[in-house]
Amino acid sequence: MGLKTVGQRVPRVDGLTKAVGQAVYAGDMEMPGMLYGKALRSAYAHAKILSIDTSSAEKIPGVHVVLTAKDIPGINKFGLAILDQPVLAADKVRMRGDAIALVAAESGDIAEEALQAIKVSYEELPGIYTIEAGLADNAPLIHEEMGTNLLQHTKVRKGNIQEGFARADVVVENTYYTQRAEHAYLEPETSLATIDVSGNVTIWTSTQYVFRDRRQIAPVLGIPTNRVRVIQAATGGAFGGKDDITTEIQAGLLALKTKRPVRVTWSRAESMVCSTKRHPMKIWCKTGATKDGRLVALEGTVYSDKGAYCSIGHFITKKAGLHLSGPYHIPHISVDTFAVYTNNTVSGPFRGFGILQSALAHESQMDMLAERLGMSPWEIRMLNA
Amino acid sequence: MALIALDLTVNGKQTQVQVEEDKNLLYLIREVLGLKGAKEGCGEGDCGACTVILDGKAVNSCLVLAVQAQGKELVTIEGLGRPDNPHPLQRAFVEEGAIQCGYCTPGMILSAKALLDYNPSPTGSEIRTAMSGNLCRCTGYQKIIRAVQKASNSMAEGKEVL
Ligand code: FES
Ligand code: FES
């Protein structure tokens, strides 16, 4: 048919710019009068903040501003789906790496020195580091206003589960655990924010979703969304990890307060501690098949470790449940999912959105069923696909 | 911190700079010389995004003190080709689809260049060894290795000169 593009090998439009080192990432940008922003991170996973003393930090020459929760002009909350994450922790911290204060200074070194000079006194609270501890009776609450650490419970029901298992000749039942994982995109999170004479804020950033970013930035800055412009710079990998707000609000707040361009870049260590991770999950699965290898019933539970905040993890957890049957036809299904807050690092989107965790469970079940039935792993899959 | 004056060759040009004595070579390149092609991925020698060529050897510029560049010859990605006249390695990376986000790319290409300067016809395993200090999270390594192989072949056939 002589199509020019479809079915042809075409070079990336930005390939050559990247190959010669001319692609501009947010960290490559500089502006006249630009300041360097940094965040003070929580030393504890779960603690009350008793006091924050920024006075000595403010006196360091070259420090332009030190901000804490009380300086936020708008709301002190953000979140991809639910606004449950503070921009700057006010009364308590819920995970290691919660931001407590922001500094803008003439250089990164001065900003770092200022962070060291901020004194925070904490009262440590009992922490929750497992799903089980989060759901235990009388568990300490991570978000008190919710009255529970259970963020969400969803159900999948199809057919009649008792009837399904009654028809099963073999049943395989197992519990699977998956680990937390870091995206480790090669470019750490970076944003550069500027403010113009009319108060419009422009933020160049390493992100995945500029519109969702501006919808979260504007309410914190206390300005209408149409006064916030977010521009995606060349982005050095993301894999779901830059779906959430990272440095955007921090840079925006500092620019708003100093009226200077401010660039915030997280160190690799900071990125490891603060950015979202793939949800660790505990998946229990009971799968029944007839002796000729046909799947007849699936019962399961999926528990996800949300870490301290939702991000979009209620949806990811639900999706793990929706995919627990894998690509197979199963007439009778009963699956429950539970998203549980803990004091671990916040879990969020990461390639697969919960489906990988489920795949470990349903594919392991298939192998074990095949073994029990004396079938080949290929045969049982083809039969049920 | 005291400022130290340095003389070095940057991409073929004799250059004089001043830099704080505690800064690393990556800082000198990005912040003092303003060459933004070298990237910082980790700042501690793990990722290779900051790779440049110093006196013919690929180095992690985050692990070299700026003052160690005194009297040396520095090559950064800006010293290879330009978009209208790319280096064979740069062309091969584009053609082989060895670039996705591109953050690892300058470091990858410079590691490959240091290899080809020293060993113009490397085997697959020699390429793998030479590139083992450069991490890529997007593309995977097959296409990158193919790109280096391709550049080496086209240079050997004399179709391309350095
Ligand atoms: S920044 Fe130098 S090795 Fe990662
Ligand atoms: S292309 Fe993104 S890290 Fe290599």
Image (cartoon, helix red, strand yellow):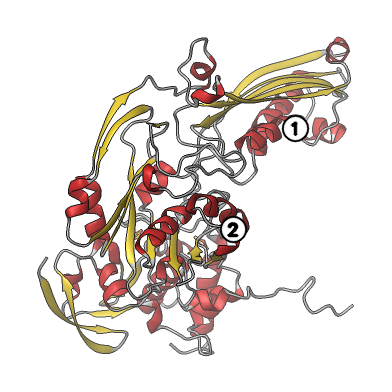
Question: Which quarter of the rendered picture does the N terminus of chain A lie within?
Answer: bottom right
Residue A52 image position (x, y, % from top left): 27, 38
Circle 1 sits in a helix, a strand or a loop, which is it? helix
Amino acid identity at mark 1: Leu
Circles 1 and 2, Cβ within 8 Å, touching? The answer is no
Query: On the image, numbered disc 1 is attached to which residue?
Result: A322
Seen in the picture, residue A87 relative to A188 is either above or below; the reply is above
Residue B49 image-quadrant placement: bottom left
Residue A294 image position (x, y, % from top left): 87, 24
Instruction: State yes or no: Cβ of the residue under disc 1 lies below 8 Å from any atom of ligand 2.
Output: no
Image position of A137 (left or right of B80): right
**Real-space CA distance between mark 1 and mark 2, rounded to the nearest whole angstrom:** 35 Å
Mark 1 — on which chain does it sit? A
Mark 2 — on which chain does it sit? A
Of residues A27 and A147, which is closer to you in this image? A147
CA neighbours of label 2 inside 10 A, class few (<14), some (14 to 19), many (20+): some
What residue do we see at 45% from left, 85% from top? Answer: B81
Seen in the picture, residue A152 relative to A238 is either above or below; the reply is above
Image position of A322 (left or right of A48): right
Seen in the picture, residue B115 relative to A336 is either above or below; the reply is below
What residue do we see at 37% from left, 64% from top? Answer: A262
Answer with mark 1 or mark 2, whichever residue precedes in sequence: 2
Q: Which mark is residue A225?
A: 2
Depth-wise, is mark 1 or mark 2 nearer the camera? 2
Seen in the picture, residue A352 relative to B127 is either above or below; the reply is above
Q: Are discs 1 and 2 located on one and the same chain?
A: yes
Residue A301 image position (x, y, % from top left): 68, 21
Residue B126 image-quadrant placement: bottom left
Residue B139 image position (x, y, % from top left): 56, 60
What residue do we see at 39% from left, 69% from top? Answer: B111
